[in-house]
Image (cartoon, rainbow, N blue to C red):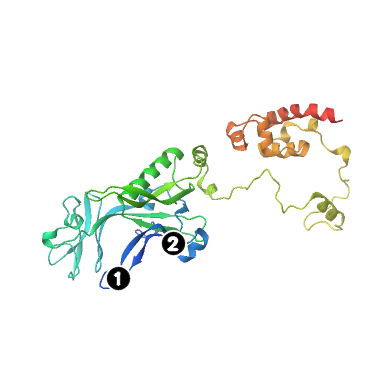
Amino acid sequence: MSPIKGISEIRRMPRLGKVRLGIKVEEPKKNPYPRPTDYFVLPEAVQKYLGEKPTKIPIMFPTENQNEFAPQFLKCYSFTQGMICRGDGIRATRKTDTATGDIANHTTKEWVFSEVTCDPDTCPQYMGDPERGIKPQCRRVMNLLFLIPEVPGFGVWQLDTSSFYSIVNINSCLDLIRRICGRISFIPLQLSLEPMEVTPPGIKRKTIHILFVRSEVKLADIQKLGRIPPERVLLPAIENEEEAPEDLFPPETLVEAEKNTTEPPPGEPVDEEEPAPGPADEKTPDDVVADDVPDLNTLFRICFHFWKLQPNEICRELGYKNQLDAYNAGIKPWEAFLTIKGMKKPQARSSK
């Protein structure tokens, strides 16, 4: 059975809701209009995770294709016909009134899609035409789609902006992140709304709030994130791995529990012919051979067993800042063990 052409190959990201940049204002005898805010307007279900009036949102982009998560076009809307024209500054697809040949409006009864030239500098829908009573209807629009990792739900959130400054900012930030990381998808980022002073043509200097894509991760660390496979980025990092978790049972409790155990756990047979190893059978550092240390994780466990060294302490003993530096350096676990053993041998002799 083959897929259905024109349907089976279509993929759409489920949309969970919208994040807005203003609140709707309704006044008598006026059409509703949005009033800009200096914070993100979130659905109530999201506010309990990110706050009531946040200026920053933790986000990730779900794909490398910027045309999928940040499409941007010139769009013209009408209250009765919805979107009546969409263009890229060169070509546009327009709803055309079949009776008049003009762009569809509230009097249009039948219309067809037609391909037309898109030139904002001469388009009456973009510039307006007072002599014909046409007000500007067309504007630039970016529809930004992103994941919010801290909010439940499988899908994307949408934010729309027509701000020249926000669109340029986001495109510039995305290019920079892609140059640094080699990719844009599943990199932990922040979408922020920040004040900026601007001087639009013919208007006094004023403060507006525009969008930025930021990162609170250091430049060196965000470069490393780019080398991590996207499916691993969403895994939570182990918090302060060098310290023992507070909810681990103390050793004496475990020993006491094992003494009181009369039957082995299910699925673990007891070999009665082989006695449990005693002190004389316990390995020493000199008994460890190369096959016992196949990788760095094993090295860390062995060094902790013999000398109570934490992973970062081991890395520092070997001349590295942390575990990540040691992994990136490609050190050989067996040679590293011999180095640590050589450092600790004098200490072991002096203690006897």
The amino acid marked with disc number 1 is Glu
The amino acid marked with disc number 2 is Leu
**Viewed as shown, does residue 337 lie left or right of 73?**
right
Q: Quadrant of the N terminus?
A: bottom left
**Viewed as shown, does residue 133 lie left or right of 169?**
left
Label 1 crowd bin: few (<14), some (14–19), many (20+), radius 10 Å: few
- Earlier-in-chain disc, 1 versus 2: 1
Label 2 crowd bin: few (<14), some (14–19), many (20+), radius 10 Å: some
* Farthest front residue in view: 204
User: CA gap, disc 1 to disc 2?
Assistant: 23 Å
Residue 308 position (above or below residue 197): above
Q: According to the image, label 2 marks what residue?
A: 42
| Nearer to us: label 1 or label 2 | 1
Can see residue 12?
A: no
Q: Quadrant of the C terminus?
A: top right
**Viewed as shown, does residue 50 lie left or right of 176?**
right
Q: According to the image, label 1 marks what residue?
A: 27
Q: Residue at x 75, y 26 (%)?
A: 342
